[in-house]
Each structure stands twice: as structure tokens, then as C-alpha cells.
Image (tube, grey):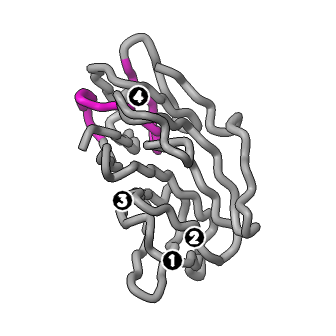
Amino acid sequence: MQIVTLADLAATPWRNGGGQTRALGSGHAPHTQPHADGFDWRISLADITADGPFSTFAGIDRHALLIGEGTVELAGPSAAVMARPLLPISFPGELDLSARRRAGTVQARLLNLMVRRSALRGRIRIVDQACRIDDAVAWALVPLRGCWHLPGHQVEVGQAVLARHGDVRSTPHEADACAALVMVCLA
């Protein structure tokens, strides 16, 4: 288990200048050769600072959770998806989409999970009570409100825990705590 302070993650600017990404972690599916683009799963934070195109990723399923405020519309010729705070969304990485921040959107920050669909499946969900994390290739817990306890660790807002495998129980410290749980599992 690795505890990460989100503010310490290096920001990588997008090629189109419309935002930046902070990688929490990435890896490969078990017992596979590394893929040419370097990952089978990737968890990151993305700050959308300007409206514009989203990158496409063939063979990748994308999952996202708006953890900032407001609304971001991801729309293209064949699909549209609305990212609203704390409501996970999923879409194929091949979709040609552009991001547009809706009026009143203060901070468009997305928690992202990308998984190679031929080997893995993924999901993001909001948890607000004790939960067991098992049967995962990799996982991350990102507190959104309150403090969370894991064996030997305490994780607070502004931090995340990233782990590979394991059978772990996470427990909120406060009654109103909530967190984003990102799971990467075998397909």
C-alpha cells in the first residue's frame, strides 16, 4: 500500500493545452506482455482548464468521476456523457469526444480510470461505509470527505492510497465520510 499526497503529484500538461493530468499509478495485467502504449490500467486526476477535445484510446474503457464542482459535458458525433459531481460515468476510449465545462463549473477535476478491455475491467464507486477490497489487480481509495482507516494507515482528504492486490478492509472515521473507490479487476 502506498499513501500519496495529491498535491505532490507532478502535473503533465495536455498536448492541446486544455488541462493537465496527475498520474496516481499504472500497470499491466498479470501474466501479460507490456502493451505498446505502456499500460493496461492507469489511474489519474485530470484538471480540465479549457474546453476542447478529449484524447482517444483504442481498446480502452474509460471511467471517470467529477470530484470538482459543476458539470462537464463530453460530447461528440455519436455520443454524449455528462459528468456531474460524485456520479461515476463510463465510456469506450475510442469515442471522439470534446469536453465542455458548463456555466458555474468552478473546478473541473476528474478522477480517471482507464483499463484495457481485452484483459481487465474497472469501475469507480462512491463508498460511505466500511467495505472490503479484494479480488483486485490494483485499487485506489481517494477520500472526498472525512478520514478513512486501513490496516496500519489513515488516509485523509488530499491523499489517496494505491495498492496492488490484497484483501483489505477500509473504514470511515466520521459518520459523514465518503471516498471514491477505484477498482481494477481481471476481465
Q: Which label number is shown at residue 148?
A: 4
Instruction: Report, in whole angstroms, how far the alpha carbon at label 3 lies from the one at label 4.
Output: 20 Å
Q: Earlier in the sequence, mark 3 or mark 4?
A: 3
User: Alpha-carbon distance for marks 1 and 2?
Assistant: 6 Å
Q: Return the disc, 4 or 1, that comes first in the chain's sequence.
A: 1
Q: Which badge, 4 or 2, is on the more N-terminal residue?
A: 2
The dot on residue 88 is 3
Q: Which mark is residue 180?
A: none
Front: mark 4 or 1: 1
Give the residue furthest to the bottom: 77
**Sequence-first disc among 1 and 3:** 3
Quadrant of the image occupied by residue 38: top right
Which dot marks residue 54? 2
Q: Nearer the viewer, residue 147 or 116?
A: 116
Q: Is residue 112 above or below residue 24?
A: below
In three-dimensional space, the C-alpha distance between marks 3 and 2, rounded to whole angstroms, equals 17 Å
Say which of marks 3 and 2 sits in front: 2
Residue 87 found in image quarter = bottom left
Residue 125 seen from this side: no
Q: Which residue is mark 1?
A: 97
Q: Amino acid at mark 3?
A: Pro
82 sits left or right of 46 in the view:
left
Q: Residue at x 31, y 50 (%)?
A: 118
Q: Secondary structure at mark 3?
A: loop
Residue beneath the point at 45% across and 63% down: 58
* Left or right of 154 in this view: 100: right
Question: Residue 149: within the magenta?
Answer: yes
Which numbered mark, 3 or 4, is in the foreground of this view? 3
- Spatial CA distance of label 4 from label 1 is 35 Å
Examine the rendered structure and indicate whether residue 91 appears above or below residue 6: below
Front position in the image: 62 or 33: 33
Q: Does 97 sit above or below residue 137?
A: below
